[in-house]
Structure formats: structure tokens, C-alpha cells
């Protein structure tokens, strides 16, 4: 979507100046991984309009392959309006009913677009956009299996999109199809009906999951695998804008997983990338390069000089 971000500190209904940016769960992760040095492709739909051009231009600028994107000449690019405040509740307004993205269909999910991929990441937002988008998500998972790619899934529950029952019905079953699950503690409670330990165990024993990463309410994170679990406390940093932290965390975790780092290192990198994003406005401004991540992580863990001289 195109993101219109209100001037810092101003409530949405009083803001007169807005900054244009781009937002979207999967595209945020794609940008995060691209900046960290990984080849990424984003598959989606935007309108054949100025907003769609702006979205694709920003993704290309970060090195994201957009060859799998369709531009719709009739349906518009989705729009997101929000304000930004580190303490006050943030007001987020979505305008995507009838958008190009909501018309995603299984026909767009082509096997050749997934060939060579090691991991395919999708969020619960996409199947909640429409019935055709839900079918496209199921097709994506099936075709990822065909090419041997791992499936990464983040529920990313947004209650403005649907009721709790709709989330449970549409997104709950998809959790069981994922190889890597990255979810909030409250999301697992909603979708699976149990505590995070019980939910993680169920996904590991009854589903496809190899690892379940749980973002806890106290902002710590737990990685649960078949060999045990490990925990990472959050890094204490000043927060400018908390939106986008979850997608940044997912990008940081997947980057470490792709490099075959262990779960403790992966949690540390994920927390580091998230901590950088919340210190900058918008969803993607703070996403680091691999070098910036490593410098920051060294400073956070070992107290090395945080100034890059």
C-alpha cells in the first residue's frame, strides 16, 4: 500500500502535513531482507496509478525483484493513513476495499516465480483481504512445497480486517502449514486457543513447523524448536515509531535462518533489526544493511563504540 504518515506527534484528525512512504507486511519483510543482502522477490498487485508506481519504485530502489507484480488498470492501489507517536495510541486507517491487492488470485501464483527460493514468506493479512486472496495464499503454500522452499508465516492479526471468528477460520489452518512460524503470543492464543508453549508444541508435533518464534507481551522473544527453546530479552532503545517492528523482526530472523545461524543468534539479530526500525519513522526507514546490523548488535551486546568512524 501507499502509506501517508502524518507529521510526527500530530493526531491523524489534526495533521495537515503527510509524508509519503510504502507499507505492507510482506513487502516490508522483502525490503528488510534485501537491505540485509538477500535476493528477494515480492509477488503482489498494485493499481496502474501514481501510487502503484511509487510503491514499485521504492521496492526496486531497495533491490527487491518486482517481476511478479501485476498492475491493475481498473482497481486502485491500497492506501494507509496513520499518525505516529511513541506514547499515545496510534490511529491507523486502511483504504483497501476493492483495491488491486484484494483481487489477488491463484492464477498469479506461478511456480516459475518461486523456483530457486529457499523460503517463501506470507502473512495472515493477505488471505484475509478476500476469498480469492485466501485461495491465492493456499496456492502459494502448495507451490512453495513443489519447489522445495520452506514456508514462513506471520499471522499479523489486524482486527480492522475481520472478526476473531474470521481470523480463526481463515488464518488458523494456515499456521499448521508453515515450516517457520513467527507470531505474537496474543495471536497464538486467538488462533489456536492455548498458551504460547502449548501452541508451539502443537505446531511442532501436529503441523509442519520446524521452529516457532513467539513475540511475547513483555517484548521478549522465544524460539521453540524440536530440540528445545531459547529466549531473548528486548534491547532498550528510544522509540520514535513502534509500527513496523514485527516485520523488521521477521526480516532479521529470516536473514539469520538463511545464513544457517543458530536460534540464539537469530533472536539477537531479529531483536536488533526491530530495535533499529522503532527508532525511525515509517515502517522501513530504519531497516539496516548487514554491516549496520552487525555494528549495532556489537554495541548492544558488548558495549562497543556505536559511532561508525
Image: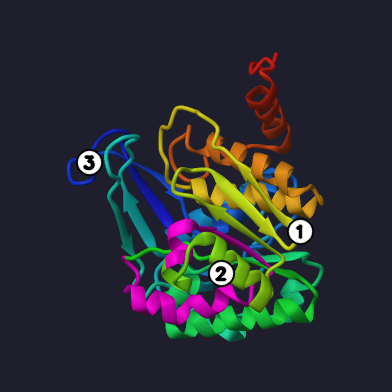
Residue 241 placement: quadrant: top left
Q: Which of 214 and 292 is in front in this view?
A: 214
- On screen, residue 44 versus residue 100, left or right, reads right
| Highlighted range, magenta | 160-189
Q: What residue is shown with label 1?
A: 227
Q: What residue is shown with label 3?
A: 11
Q: What element carries label 2?
A: strand
Q: Which of 208 and 11 is in front in this view?
A: 208
Q: Quick check: is 85 in the magenta stretch?
A: no
Furthest toward the left, the residue is 14
Vertical arrangement, residue 268 with respect to residue 307, above or below? below
At a point 46% along the width and 80% down the height, the residue shown is: 170
Residue 235 placement: quadrant: top right
Mark 1 / mark 3, whichever is N-terminal: 3
Vertical arrangement, residue 190 with respect to residue 134, above or below? above
Q: Where is residue 223 in the image (x, y as percent from the top left)?
A: 65, 53
At a point 50% along the width and 65% down the height, the residue shown is: 155
* Residue 49 seen: no
Amino acid at each position: 500500500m501507499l502509506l501517508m504518515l502524518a507529521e510526527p506527534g500530530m493526531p491523524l484528525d489534526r495533521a495537515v502535513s503527510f509524508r509519503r512512504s510504502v507499507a505492507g507486511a510482506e513487502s516490508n519483510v522483502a525490503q528488510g531482507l534485501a537491505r540485509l543482502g538477500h535476493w528477494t522477490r515480492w509477488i503482489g498487485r498494485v493499481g496502474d496509478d501514481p501510487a502503484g508506481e511509487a510503491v514499485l519504485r521504492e521496492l526496486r530502489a531497495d533491490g527487491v525483484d518486482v517481476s511478479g507484480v501485476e498492475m491493475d488498470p481498473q482497481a486502485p492501489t491500497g492506501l494507509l493513513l496513520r499518525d505516529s507517536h511513541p506514547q499515545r495510541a496510534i490511529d491507523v486507517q486502511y483504504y483497501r476495499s476493492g483495491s488491486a491487492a484484494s483481487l489477488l488470485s491463484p492464477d498469479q501464483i506461478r511456480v516459475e516465480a518461486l523456483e530457486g527460493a529457499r523460503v517463501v514468506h506470507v502473512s495472515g493479512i493477505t488471505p484475509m483481504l478476500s476469498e480469492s486472496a485466501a485461495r491465492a495464499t493456499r496456492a502459494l503454500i502448495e507451490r512453495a512445497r513443489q519447489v522445495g522452499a520452506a514456508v514462513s508465516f506471520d499471522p499479523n492479526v489486524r482486527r480492522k480486517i475481520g472478526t476473531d471468528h474470521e481470523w480463526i477460520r481463515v488464518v488458523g489452518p494456515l499456521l499448521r502449514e508453515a515450516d517457520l512460524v513467527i507470531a505474537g503470543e496474543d495471536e497464538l492464543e486467538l488462533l489456536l486457543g492455548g498458551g504460547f508453549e502449548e501452541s508451539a508444541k502443537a505446531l511442532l508435533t501436529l503441523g509442519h513447523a520446524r521452529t516457532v518464534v513467539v513475540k511475547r507481551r513483555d517484548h521478549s522473544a522465544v524460539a521453540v524448536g524440536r530440540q528445545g527453546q531459547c529466549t531473548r530479552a528486548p534491547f532498550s532503545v528510544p522509540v520514535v515509531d513502534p509500527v513496523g517492528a514485527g516485520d523488521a523482526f521477521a526480516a532479521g530472523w529470516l536473514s539469520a535462518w538463511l545464513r544457517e545461524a543458530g536460534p540464539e543468534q537469530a533472536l539477537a539479530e531479529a531483536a536488533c533489526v526491530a530495535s533499529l526500525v522503532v527508532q525511525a519513522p515509517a515502517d522501513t526507514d530504519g531497516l539496516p544493511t548487514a554491516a549496520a546490523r552487525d555494528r549495532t548488535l556489537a554495541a548492544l551486546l558488548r558495549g562497543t563504540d556505536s559511532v561508525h568512524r
